[in-house]
Amino acid sequence: MSVENPLPYILTAIGSVVVSVVALSHYGYLHEAKPEDALLLAEYTMLKTVEGEDYSVSLKPAEQVAQCIDGVMVLFDTKQPGLSGVLVDDRKRAVRCAMGSAASGQPPAPAQ
């Protein structure tokens, strides 16, 4: 079997790829990353608590709510529904959490 003119096959292949991408994009299966997707939600600082020393915090709560999900601290923004992110340190390492350890007053055991 010899192909005398491959142009129709090439155009069909290119057209099917374009139609597939447009259809997937239209139905929301393709996500185009935007620079604002990777922006910081907010800056955080840890206040070290030392026994016998006073510290003060604002009475007004932050605009984010934290929840422990699968051992990772996830922040949800209360002003922009649907905006959430993982709490990370300055080296982009996820902050771990342990359910129930805060009630005991003892820090969680370090991960092995």
Image: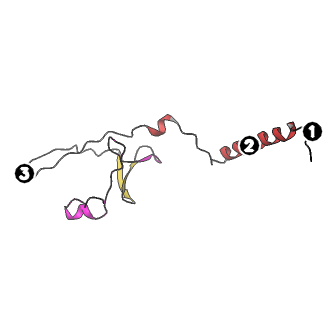
Q: Which of 46 and 2 is in front in this view?
A: 2
For label 3, the SS is loop
Q: Residue at image x 71%, y 45%?
A: 23
Q: Residue at image x 34%, y 42%?
A: 91
The reply to whether callout 3 and callout 2 are in contact (CB within 8 Å) is: no
Q: Residue at image x 46%, y 47%?
A: 81
Residue 49 x, y percent position in the rendering: 15, 49
Which amino acid type is marked by label 2?
A: Val
For label 2, the SS is helix
- Is the C terminus in the top left, top right, bottom left or bottom right quadrant? bottom left
If you read the primary sequence from the N terminus, does the residue marked by circle 2 or circle 1 appear first? 1
Q: Is residue 74 above or below residue 98?
A: above
Q: Quadrant of residue 42?
A: top left
For label 1, the SS is loop
The main secondary structure of the magenta stretch is loop
Nearest to viewer (mark 2 / mark 1): 1
The reply to whether callout 2 and callout 1 are in contact (CB within 8 Å) is: no
In the picture of the structure, the residue carrying the numbered disc 2 is: 17
If you read the primary sequence from the N terminus, does the residue marked by circle 3 or circle 1 appear first? 1
In the picture of the structure, the residue carrying the numbered disc 3 is: 52
Residue 1 x, y percent position in the rendering: 92, 48
Q: Is residue 111 above or below residue 20?
A: below
- Please state if 70 lies on the left or on the right of 108 as rendered: right
